[in-house]
Amino acid sequence: MTDRFMLSRRQLLKTSAAGAALGLASASFPISRAFAAAATVGFIYVGPKDDYGYNQAHAEGAAALKGIEGISIVEEENVPETVDVQKTMESMINLDGASLIFPTSFGYFDPHMLAMCAKFPDVQFRHCGGMWNKDKHPMNAGSYFGYIGMGQYLNGVVAGHTSKTKKLGFVAAKPIPQVLLNINSFLLGARSVDPTITCQVIFTGEWSLAVKEAEATNALVDQGIDVVTCHVDSPKVVVETAAGRGAFVCGYHANQSPLAPEKYLTGAEWNWAKVYKMFVDDLVAGKPLPNFTRGGLADGFVKMSPLGPAVSEAARKQFDATLAEMTKGGFSVIKGPLKSNMGAVVATEGQAFAETAIELESMDYLVEGVVGSTA
């Protein structure tokens, strides 16, 4: 019933005429106010909520709020990064009375969320990513994100112990800084086990394109790669394809172990429940919401999937020791001496970049040992 109602709301806002009609209807029939909670929070997903990936991770975070007294949750999935998301946000505000909205996908921010911020200055919007800038963006907007590169480093530690061929594979969507950091972190984690390990990366060019993801995974396994991970919206295709070919897999975004129980080693997961509860606690208490929120493993923003049955005792020991070190704080994935795969020095001897370093947010290189190009 909820999904059908939400779909009809979106259809009502398809045209300006329908939007005007909705305004009249809202004035005459205060639908949202009739069932008003202490606060209504909206979540918008670019894909399905059960994608075993990016969208599922956010949906699990939203689900953790449903037991909080006085909080009402509204969600809409499969909303493209077009004007459709503006209509979804507007309907959540006008029909449901949402006072806080989380548009979770990268492409929702500009111009779509920013347009809604200007139209509804009394509503708070928080976007998953790093694009909010206090010098040019409104104060009812903001961003949140986690340092998940640490999780990919731990993936690499386990992969390094597991690989027999010493050749790892990475299926990536686009060569943006966060993706490059994840690729580099994965290899550097593996090289903490064996400095001779290499990693082949294939970019698909899209966040979600099942055919290309399957082709890329098969191409990696054809080269003798025996452990694969990824950074795409839904790792489902990569995990199932790699495991079906006999390769081991490390997950990303959410726990994909049910897809390949014998071949799943571990995975770097988001823990958005922690983040969303922080925002909602402030909302209910009447406190100003932070505009810039970041955290890593030590803050509980990121977590690791349980280690799978194929993980060796040596891998478990190094995994646990490294995780403990990261949790204490101060751990650096990118540290010298380190070169890019094009031979440029990216960190000198004794130089180390913390996970909060601005240099990592503008990363444009792949480290030595990664086979592939950012072009």
Image (cartoon, rainbow, N blue to C red):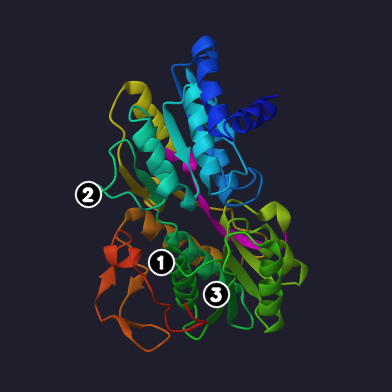
Q: Which mark is residue 135?
A: 2
**Of 362 and 307, the residue lying toward us:** 362
Q: Which residue is mark 1?
A: 177
Q: Please identify the quarter of the rendering in which residue 290 is found.
A: top left
Gap between marks 2 and 1 measured at Cα: 22 Å
Q: Could you tell me the amino acid type at mark 3?
A: Gly
Percent position (x, y) of residue 121?
33, 30
Q: What residue appears at the point 37 percent right and 60 percent down from the top-left corner? A: 325
Q: Residue furthest front?
A: 17
- Indicate whether 66 appears above or below 359: above
Label disc, if present, on residue 257 of the rendered structure: none
Whichever of callouts 3 and 1 sits on the residue coming sooner in the sequence is 3
Q: Which secondary structure, mark 3?
A: helix
Q: Which residue is mark 3?
A: 160
Indicate the amino acid at tag 2.
Answer: Asp
> Which residues lie in the magenta part?
261-275
Does dot 2 land on a helix, a strand or a loop? loop
Q: Crowding at label 1, few (<14), some or many (≥20) Cα neighbours within 10 Å?
A: some
